[in-house]
Every structure is written in structure tokens, then in C-alpha cells.
Amino acid sequence: MKRGSKGAYIYGFAGGKADGRADMKKLLGGKGANLAEMTNLNIPVPPGFTITTEACLKFYESGKRWPDGLEAELGRNVQWLENVSGKGFGDPANPLLVSVRSGAMVSMPGMMDTILNLGLSDRTVQGLIRKTGNPRFAYDAYRRFIQMFGDVVLGVEHKAFEQALAAKKRQHGVTNDPDLPAEALQELVGEFKAIVHRHAKVDFPDEPMEQLRLAINAVFSSWNNERAITYRKLHGIPDTLGTAVTVQTMVFGNMGNKSLTGVGFTRDPATGANRFYGEYLVNAQGEDVVAGIRTPLPAEQMKKDFPKVYDRLLSVGKRLEKYFRDIQDLEFTVEEGDFFMLQCRSGKRTALAAVTVAVDLVKEGLITKEEALLRIQPTQIDQLLHPTIDPKAKVKVIAKGLPASPGAAVGRVVFTAHEAVELVEEKGGRVILVRQETSPEDIAGMAAAQGILTARGGLTSHAAVVGRGMGKCCVVGCNDITVREEERWFEVGGLVVKEGEYITLNGTTGDVMLGETPLVKPQLTGAFKQVLQWADAARRLGVRTNGDTPQDAKTAREFGAEGIGLCRTEHMFFGDERLPVVREMIVAKDTAARRKALAKLLPFQKQDFIGIFRAMEGLPVTVRLLDPPLHEFLPNTPEDITRVAQQLGISEQALTDTVHRLHEFNPMLGHRGCRLGIVFPEINEMQAQAIFEAACELTKQGVKVLPEVMVPLVGHPKEFQAAKLVIDRVARETMARSKVAVPYTVGTMIEVPRAALVAETIAQDAEFFSFGTNDLTQMTFGFSRDDIGKFLPTYLKDGILESDPFAKLDQDGVGALIRIAVQKGRSVRKHLKVGICGEHGGEPSSIEFCHRAGLDYVSCSPYRVPVARLAAAQAALKEKKK
């Protein structure tokens, strides 16, 4: 490239040669790196240059000032682009126009800002008219530029321009933008400038270099706009990456009926089917397609109307897919018959598409099984566990749109992102976000909603792309409905659906149904099943489930759980028949009365264990003895105390006295866990008897049972020894009565920091450890799980914490205690079995830590089991690569 050596901050691309490469995404962003690679591959790409992410980071470090040397480097590169294009930046005879686009290392579709047609002014628009002989095109490009620049750079609300455009269309009696004549668009230019002056209190800048500097600043600044920050939080993208800025010669899809613009995917991003999937608009610019302002045409129509363009697009797409070895998301423009690629990147896809494409690419010999496993995000797998419409259900379909993201969703209709967030967070409701079309500002509401419905937009619109990325059921381009966002209702065929009414979406078919439709659970089949089989072959960590009922156990086993890592017996105490008996035990005046109540509970507990052991036949089941403080089972309000006292046959005063006696200032550190069984050993006796009677009964029936009894909240070895003496005695007595032997183990939860620090003393008696990371996190940080919400948002915003430590394991602090406990425990019991059963057992980065720390298994909720299977495989593969 005859432009001298690349500079410190700018990398160019033109004419088959580029300074950058595809593997430079961290520096050039995904857009800039792939534009460079396509240029090197001699694919037709408009020439341009990319300002690096390093410049963006220094921009922020310097208080939003450019780093030294960038201004001069920009000037040199603009001159170079003038030479390459044969046009002049600001030249009234032959003007060079450019696009200014963001592009981070990780794709964030629609979250940051883009400006098209930069370089237009009252002088250069005349040159564009003379050059093209097309005043309508020139004024259309100019009004678009003022609108985008006014919105992105000068902060003028997008709605102000849209209202003026709508009024102009009404004035001329047309419905679509392309039908406005040149003189109407020229009038709009003047009106848009007046809007800018009125709202921004400045004149619209006419000098192209000033426009460019301001646009670059705006794109840099968009890295930290609210929607980008929200998107990064939702997808776990670091705030420290920054965005690159690509400045590229404009090509125009709005020059007439031989020009078009569109987006496409080399495979279906919703299902993964190996068929080209795309949309386009004739006489339009790219923003018209992705913003959902006009509903685009499907690629099949292009095959009929523009067969040569279709064939070229298909050929380039398949070449890029084979080169990058992944499904490609393409942006293209045809200017008066000339084809140009504006972007390629790995396509955002649903979980269904992710596993389907991964399996197909392995079959096609493009990637290995190991690469396939590493390409699928474990958290994305959760989407495949979403429900679908019950095929037996009677449904009332009221409208049909485009199926943008599969699955099913039921919820109350809301019309703003704010209302969606508020209803979900404050009232715990389920909502469907209904919009004319979504915009990047809706990101938080889209995340909160069960599903998304838009009246406009296509399968590559903002709602579709972002919805697929989030795994949200999404139906777009539903032209049947008329949305009245301000009046808070939508209408379809004379039927009015108001805010708060229930609707159901089918993101697989595009159906919109009135009311709450029954849903059914998913199954592991096809490509999903294949991926999980590959994962099981690759992983070392076992995967168990946290389950308290036979149904939990059955569901988890269907999802591939290899046992139960945490069965919480207290959850069994809250049934309608059981709770009064539990309360009778709590208010008992002496041991005899307490044993009498516990004897009534024994049959309930035994039947619970029979159901769970049977469902988990042949697999280990870790049963945790009673953990919560007893006051949790008692009433709080005067009304409830009156009612419960009558049930128990005691005075209100006696019950009130018991409630007050059991009250604790800090119950999480109070009389709970193993402390209950030490003070009231009859509780441990009853639970152990229920466990071993159930195990013996099933063993006699030929059912293989592997019980593991877990003592909670141990901090001192003598606490564990006291509990184990009771458990072992009851086990011996029960087996002797039953005349059957059942293999079992007794272990403890490591959830008190002291237990981790003296693990070698506890492991002398304990046969397994299970880390209860919820309590271990709470006690290590000194954070209350119930109260952390008061300050956690500030801690996250200010960067004190990178993430919620109850959602993602604190590997430096809590992780250090885990490593210490594993090392100390195995120093005295070489084959000590060690697992984790807190919420972290289903979180991918925490699972990777557990693999590195040498744990034997993780345990998580039933619907996280497939996620954990894949994450455990990825942990093993990453270690192998190192």
C-alpha cells in the first residue's frame, strides 16, 4: 500500500492490501480486522482506515482528549484515502463521503454508534448532484447524514427528525421514504438543520474535517453509553477493551432501483440450517434494514429480482465461511450494479443454531470436535432448555410475524423497556415487550422480558439480532398488529390488547396468541445430544444436581446428572401436612415431646427419600441434614400466631414466647446447621433413621442406593464427630433391624472459613467435603446475601467488584479457601471426594476454577446440568491446550 508505513494509531486497507489482519481484533476491533482480512483476500471492500482501540483507551485516560500524534495521522490518512478514491474530502466538484463506524473486539450489534454520508454540506451536495445526475439520491443522503449526525454527535432526539419525516410523507401523500421526490428531501434538509439548531443550540457543521473529528469523538464516547454498558454487563464483556473507529469510503444502496443494501447469514442463525438467510432493501441504506424502519425483502426475492447479485453474495459468503470456519454475518451494498462487502463477522446465533452449526462443521471437516465444544457458550445452552408450546394446547392465534428467535414465552403486555424492567424487578412478573420496533435503548427491557414482539423490522433487525443473542423468544415484523405505544395498546383485526393482558409468543413459528398458553419442557435430542456426548467424553469433572424432590431428580437425570450433590431436607418440612408437625416439634417443652413430634415426621421424610433414591438408582445422593434456624418455620404476624396457636392447641402467649426465644440478631451465624443436631440430637436421629430405613427398604427390592449423609455448617472437628457418632449408630441399628447392608458415607459442607483452614483435622473423620459456596462467600466477605443489594450496584459501577460474588465465584478469596481445604483434606485422606454445591456449581467460570482446583464434581440446579457438562468439558480442553 503506497501510504508509507502504518502509523501508531491508524491502519489502512485498500486495493487488495491491508495493514491489519483478522487476528488483530483486540487492536482493530472485529469490524476493522475483518475488513482488513477481506481486503487481503481480494474481496471487493470500499477503501478506508481503522483507528485502533488503543487510541480509544488513551482518549478516556486523557479526559476525552486525543492522544498525541492522532490528529496529524488522521490528516495523512484522509489525504491517502483521497488519492485512493480519486475524490476530495470537501471538494465541491467531486466530494469524498465516508462512513464512521464503531467496532469492538467482541461484537455488540447496535450498541454503539454509526454515521453515514459524512462529508456532505450545502456545497458538496451540489457536486454530488452534478456527479451523479441524481438530485433525489443526493438530498436523501444529505438528510440522512444530518439526522444521524444530529442524533449521534449532537444529541438531538431521533424522534424529532422522524416526526418531520412523517409529516413530509403525509404532505406528499406517500407511505414509504423512497417515494418522496427530490424537492421534498431538499426541504427536509433545511428542516432537519433547523431542528438541530433548535435542540442542540448550534449550527450544523459544514466543514468535513470538523464533522469527522466530532464523529470520531462520538464513536469513542459511545463505548460508554448506557446501552453499551448494559450489553457488556449482560454478556460479560470487559469494560477495558475500548472500541476501534473505522472510516470508510461510502458506497450507496440508495442511488436508484439498481442499487440495494442488505445483511445476510451463510446459515440460518435461528435454527442453524445450512441455507443462506438474508434480507435486503432496494434504494436504501444499511441502517434502514437493521433499524427495522422498513420491513425488508427476503433473500429468496433477491434470487428472482437480482440473480447475479444473489449468486455473487452466496459465493462470497461461502468463501468467507470456509476461510473463517464459522457461520458468517454479512453486510453488503450494491451501488448501480457494483457489489461491495461492508462487513463480515461470526454470526450471532441462537443456542439451537450454535449446536447445529458446530456439529455440521465437524461433519463437514472444517473444525474438530474439540473446537466445536469450545465455540459454544455454556450459558447459551440454557436457551435450549426453554419451554415450547404444548402441542395439545388449544390456542387462539391472533397474528403472525417473522420467527426471529425460537422457543415460547408467556407474559403480560408492556410497551416500554422501563415498564418491563420495573414490573419484573419490583413485582416479579412475566412480561412481553411489544414495540413498533426496538432500538438499542431498549436493551434492559429486552433482557427483563420473557419475549419480544415488534410490528416492524425483519429477521436481521435490531430486535431479532439482540433477541437471538440473549436467547429470548422473539417475533418481529408482525404487520398484522397496529401498536399504539403511547396509548398502551395494540390492535389486530378489530381486537384490542391492552397493557397488562397476557399474550403468548411462538418464536419458532412467528405465531402471536391471546392469553396464557400451556408450555412443555424441552428434551435433549439431535445436535444438542451429540454436543453433550462429546462434552462428557472430554470432561474430568463430574456433574450432579441440587434436588429436593423425585421430580427434581428425574428431570436432572434426564439432563445427564450423575447424582445429587445437595438434597435439602428442610424443603421437605414445608408441606401442608408436615409444617404443623415441625412446629409441634419446635414448641415441645422437653425431649420426650420433641421425639413424639419427630416420630410423626419420620414417615414423611422416609417416603421423600424413597422417591429420590429410586429416581437416582445407582447414583450417589448427598442428603444434607437440617440446616436453617428453627424460627424460619414459625409464624411472624399476630394473625398467623393466632391461627397457628389454635392448630397446635397452645396459647398465643406460649407461641409468642417461643418466637421471641428463638429470635436471633444474626440468624445466619446463629443456632442452625450442625448446632441444631448437637443441642437436639434427636433431630439428627430422626433424619438418619429416615435415610437408612428408605435405603434398606429399596435395597431389599433390588434398587441400588448410594446415600451420602452431609453435616452442615461445621467449623470444628468435634462438631462433626458428635454428629457422625449419631449417624453411624442409627445406621448400624437400622441395618441390623432390616438385616441388610447399605454402603454409605458421612461428610460435611465446608462453608465456614475456619473449616477450610483446619480441613486436615475434619478430614480425619469426614469421608467427603462439599463446598457450600453461598455461605462460604457470605462469611468470607462478611456480606449478607439478603442485604447486599443495598450496595452491590455501587460496588459494580465503581469497579470495586467485577461481578456479584454470589453469582460468580470469588476465585482470589473464597477460591483460596477452597484450594487450602482441598490440599489440607487430601493430605490426611488421599482420595477424599470433594465437590461444590452452591449456586456457583452451574456458573461456567466457577466450574473452570473447580476443575483447576482438583474437585471431583460440581452440583447445580437441574436445568443447569447441561450447562455444567459443557463448561466442565471446556475447562478440560483449555487445560489441555495450555
Image: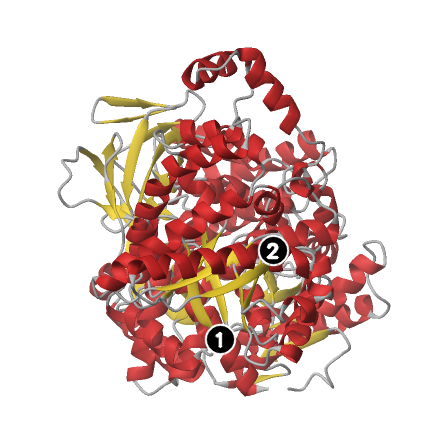
Residue 180's spot in the image, x, y percent?
40, 40
Density class for disc 1 (Cα within 10 Å; few <14, some 14-19, many ≥20) is many
Which quadrant of the figure has residue 362?
Answer: bottom left
Residue at coordinates 23% horizontally, 59% vertically from top-left? 301
**Pointer 1 residue:** 874
Q: Nearer the viewer, residue 142 or 269?
A: 269
Pointer 1 with pointer 2, Cβ within 8 A: no
Q: In this view, does 774 lie to the left or right of 554?
A: right
Residue 204 shows in this picture: yes
Q: Which of 207 and 690 is in front in this view?
A: 690
Label 2: state its secondary structure.
helix
Residue type (three-letter) at the residue carrying disc 1: Gln
Density class for disc 2 (Cα within 10 Å; few <14, some 14-19, many ≥20) is some
Residue 155 shows in this picture: no
**Pointer 2 residue:** 722
Residue at coordinates 46% horizontally, 52% vertically from top-left? 137
The answer to whether 21 is drawn above or below residue 778 in the figure is below
Depth-wise, is mark 1 or mark 2 nearer the camera?
A: 2
Residue 280's spot in the image, x, y percent?
34, 57
Which colour assignment does the render follow? secondary structure
Residue 111's spot in the image, x, y percent?
56, 52
Residue at coordinates 19% horizontally, 44% vertically from top-left? 390
Give how far apart the Cα atoms at labels 1 and 2 are.
41 Å
